[in-house]
Image (cartoon, grey):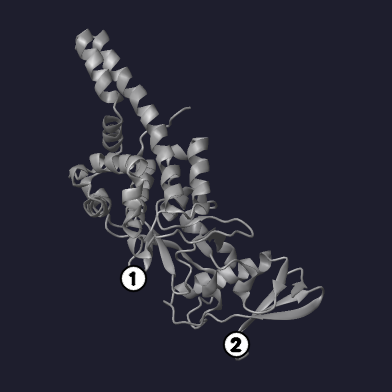
Amino acid sequence: MLKKTTMDIVCFNRSGIIPAFEYSNNGESEFVDYRPSIKNLDADLNVDDYIVELLINPMLSNESDVYYLCMKSASVTECDRQTIGAIFPILALDSDQEIHKFMGNYLYVAFWHLLKRLKSLKSGDFSDNFESNVCVCVFSKRLAGDNPLYLCIHSLRKYGYSYFEDNNNVLPIEGYSRELIIGNNQKNINIELKEPILYHHPIIDRILRDLKSANNVTHRFVLLYQIIELLMGDAIIKDIDKIYSRLQNGKISTNDYFAEVSRVSKEKERIHNIFQHCNIRSVDCEKFVKSCKELFDKSGLHSEVNSIASDMFYNFRNKMMHSYSRLYAHRDLMSKTIQNFEQIVLLIIEKYPRPIVG
C-alpha cells in the first residue's frame, strides 16, 4: 500500500527506541524508522555537502557490500588514497549491522536524500521502495565535485555497477563470480574521476549501457567483442597510414609496403597492436590467461595455449566462434574466462589513447 506524500522532511528524531525521520504527509506528520547506527554521526553533518546517486548491481547487493570510494590525490603520497564517498546496496539502509564509524555519515545522508526524492512511501522496510539490486553512491562535493558519477562510472563498471533505471529487472550474470571482482575482506573501491575517450563514441557508449541487461555470458561476450572490432578498424587505418608514410619517405620498398600491410591486416596482429597501444601488461591479463589455458586444456584444445596475452585473447575469440560446443561443455570455466575477458576489454577502453570515428 502506498502513502501519498509530499516528502517534506521536518527533522530527525533520535529520542525513540528506534530513531526516525519525521516528514509531512499532506500536512500531517509521519515517521519512517532509521535503523543504521547513529552513534558516530558527525554533529555538524550537512546533507547538502553530498551528492547521492543510484546505481544497479545484482552481484554486490548484500547488506554487507558496503565500500568506501577512494582515489589518488595530489595531496597524498602515490600509494595513499583519499576517501571521497561510499557505495552500498539499498538494503544497507535497513540494516542495524555494525559499521565502520565514518560510514554512518554516508548512510544517513543517503537516507535523507532518497526519502526527500520519493513521491510515495510503501509500508514496510525503506528498501521496499526500490528494486533489490539498487545500490546507493554518495560523494563528497568538496572532494569529488558536483557531477562525479559520469567521470567514475567506468571504474565502477569493473565491479559490476551500472547506471540506474526505474523499475529495472537486471539479473545477476550467469556464471559470473563476485570473488573475481572483489575480495572477501575488501573495504575500499578505487576509482578515477576520468571519463575514457572512447565513451564519446555512440556505439561503445550504447554497448556499455546495454551490458547490464545481458545476463547470458555468450550474449555478453558478443557485445564486448563488438568494441574490439571497432578498435581493430581504427587500429588498421592508423597502422597503414604509418606504413604508407614510411614508403613515401623512401624508408621501405613497395614490396615491403605490401608485406607490411598484409601483416597488420591480420586480426591477430591488430589485437596485438591494440594491446601495445593501450600498454596492456602481462600482469593485467594473468587471471584471463590462467582461466583460458585451463579451459582450453579441458576442452582438448592444447595447441591453442600460448603465453602471450594478446594471442590468447585472439585464440579465445576464435574458439568462441568456431569451437563453442567444446567450450560450452565446461560452462562454469567458460563463464569465468568471459568474466576475465570482460575486465581486459574494460581496461582497453580505459587506456585507449585516441578517439575513433565511424
Residue 341 shown left or right of residue 85 in the figure: left
Residue sitting at 23 percent across and 19 percent down? 260
Q: Residue at x 27, y 8 (%)?
A: 248
Label 2 environment density (alpha carbons within 10 Å; few <14, some 14–19, many ≥20): few
**Where residue 325 sits: x, y (%)?**
35, 49
Within-10-Å neighbours for mark 1: few <14, some 14–19, many 20+: few
Q: Which residue is mark 1?
A: 184
In the rendered image, which quarter is residue 12 located in? bottom right
Q: Which residue is mark 2?
A: 18
Amino acid type assigned to the residue bearing label 2 in the image: Ile
Whether residue 96 is visible to the viewer of this picture, yes or no, is yes
Question: Mark 2 or mark 1, which is nearer the start of the sequence?
Answer: 2
Badge 1 vs badge 2, beta-carbon distance below 8 Å: no
Of residue 329 and residue 13, the one placed in the foreground of this image is 329
The x, y position of residue 211, in whole percent, is: 49, 49
Residue at the image position 46 percent from the left and 57 percent from the top: 143
> Quick check: 200 above or below 176?
above
Q: Nearer the viewer, residue 45 or 12?
A: 12
Instruction: Give the number of the mark in front: 1 or 2.
Output: 1
Pick the front one: 204 or 351:
204
Q: In the picture provided, is 336 more to the left or to the right than 90?
A: left
